[in-house]
């Protein structure tokens, strides 16, 4: 590595490095920052020269952080958080700024949108970015500020708060349920092949290995829409099935094990006022509607 060109890193170099570290590719980082690939590469080279260490390695799957890069990303993320914190509370100590929340698609569309949309209405300076993802989204790489997940992370400097226990059941139209209960062959709506790894999809495959699946789609909110059309029975979380007036609970005795829902944040964000405000709102919302989720209320 060449000798250092500067004694201190340039913030724009760090900003580009943060984007590359979080997104893992030149193209994704370039899109996030609205610059070209050459700018990303030049800034990374500049930062490596300044620090005197190799920060990233290019591999077939994209850019991977070296051990020095992992340390630098953590330090740069802390710097970014400190800078953002300076402007994230108003003169009257009100929350201000953008908070990013990431959660599974069914939970977002079937529950969270309506509840989280209340936050900007209550706090005029606070903005919400609500995104969906089945798979884990990195808090440590600052891809999101708050993650809601159906599993607890095993490592990382993360605060994990249990929210509710999510129960499941089969739901279908009253007519379809009546036909099946009269002796008709059950027909189902299920996950597509891409999402066959989801625990509920795997449980269904074990229970009904030869059953007809007349409609397959990527998430349970979409499955509820298909079930409402009379296409088949859908295995849904209760918070979706119970709130759809076009659906009826079929076979309450037949369901996969419930799952714990967790709210995850970075430990060093615990004093960040906007994030703390959204966390408190979410905690209150889930506590107030616990019966909607849990199997005991069936």
Image (cartoon, rainbow, N blue to C red):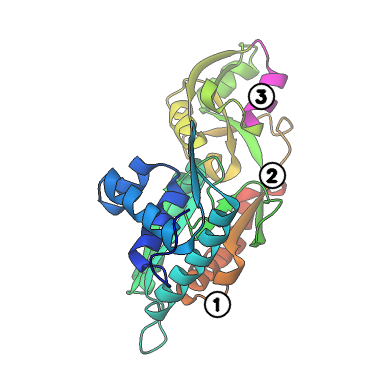
Nearer to us in this view, 296 or 13: 13
> Percent position (x, y) of residue 93?
42, 86
Tag nearer the camera, 1 or 2: 1
The magenta stretch is: 200-210
> Disc 2 or 3, which lies upstream in sequence?
3
What count of labels does the image hold? 3
Q: Secondary structure at mark 1?
A: loop
Distance from disc 1 to disc 3, alpha carbons, whole Å, reads 42 Å
Which quarter of the rendered picture does the C terminus lie within? top right
- The residue to which callout 1 is attached is 271
> Disc 1 or 2, which lies upstream in sequence?
2
The residue at the point 63 percent across, 15 percent down is 182
Q: Is residue 104 left or right of residue 261?
A: left
The residue at the point 69 percent across, 34 percent down is 252
Does the rendering let one see residue 287? yes
Nearer to us in this view, 188 or 180: 188
Does the rendering let one see residue 192? no
- The residue to which callout 3 is attached is 204
Magenta stretch contains residue 203: yes
Residue 49, picture quadrant:
bottom left
- The residue to which callout 2 is attached is 259
Placement of 101 over or under 179, stated as above or below: below
Distance from disc 1 to disc 2, alpha carbons, whole Å, reads 29 Å
Nearer to us in this view, 281 or 231: 281
Nearer to us in this view, 186 or 48: 48
Placement of 183 over or under 140, stated as above or below: above
The residue at the point 48 percent across, 77 percent down is 273
> Percent position (x, y) of residue 166?
65, 46
Dominant secondary structure of the residues highlighted in magenta in the image: helix
Mark 1 vs 3: CB contact within 8 A = no
> Disc 1 or 3, which lies upstream in sequence?
3
> Percent position (x, y) of residue 52?
49, 60
């Amino acid at each position: 590595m060449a000798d250092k060109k500067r004694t201190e890193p340039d913030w724009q170099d760090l900003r580009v490095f943060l984007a590359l570290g979080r997104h893992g590719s030149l193209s994704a980082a370039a899109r996030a920052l609205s610059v070209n690939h050459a700018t990303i590469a030049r800034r990374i080279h500049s930062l490596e020269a300044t620090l005197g260490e190799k920060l990233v390695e290019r591999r077939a799957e994209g850019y991977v952080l070296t051990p020095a890069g992992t340390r630098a990303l953590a330090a740069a993320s802390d710097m970014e958080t400190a800078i953002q914190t300076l402007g994230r509370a108003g003169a009257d100590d009100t929350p201000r700024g953008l908070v990013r929340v990431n959660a599974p698609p069914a939970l977002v569309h079937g529950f969270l949108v309506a509840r989280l949309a209340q936050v900007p209405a209550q706090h005029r300076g606070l903005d919400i970015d609500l995104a969906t993802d089945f798979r884990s989204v990195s808090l440590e790489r600052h891809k999101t500020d708050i993650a809601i997940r159906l599993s607890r992370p095993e490592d990382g400097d993360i605060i994990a708060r249990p929210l509710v226990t999510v129960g499941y059941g089969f739901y279908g139209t009253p007519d379809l349920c009546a036909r099946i209960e009269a002796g008709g062959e059950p027909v189902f709506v299920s996950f597509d092949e891409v999402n066959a790894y989801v625990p509920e999809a795997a449980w269904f495959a074990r229970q009904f290995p030869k059953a007809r699946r007349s409609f397959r789609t990527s998430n349970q909110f979409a499955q509820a829409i298909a079930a409402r059309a009379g296409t088949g029975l859908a295995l849904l979380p209760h918070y979706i099935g119970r709130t759809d007036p076009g659906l009826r609970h079929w076979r309450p005795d037949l369901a996969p094990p419930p799952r714990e829902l967790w709210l995850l944040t970075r430990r060093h964000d615990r004093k960040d006022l906007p994030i703390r405000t959204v966390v408190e709102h979410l905690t209150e919302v889930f506590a107030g509607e616990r019966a909607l989720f849990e199997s005991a209320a069936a």
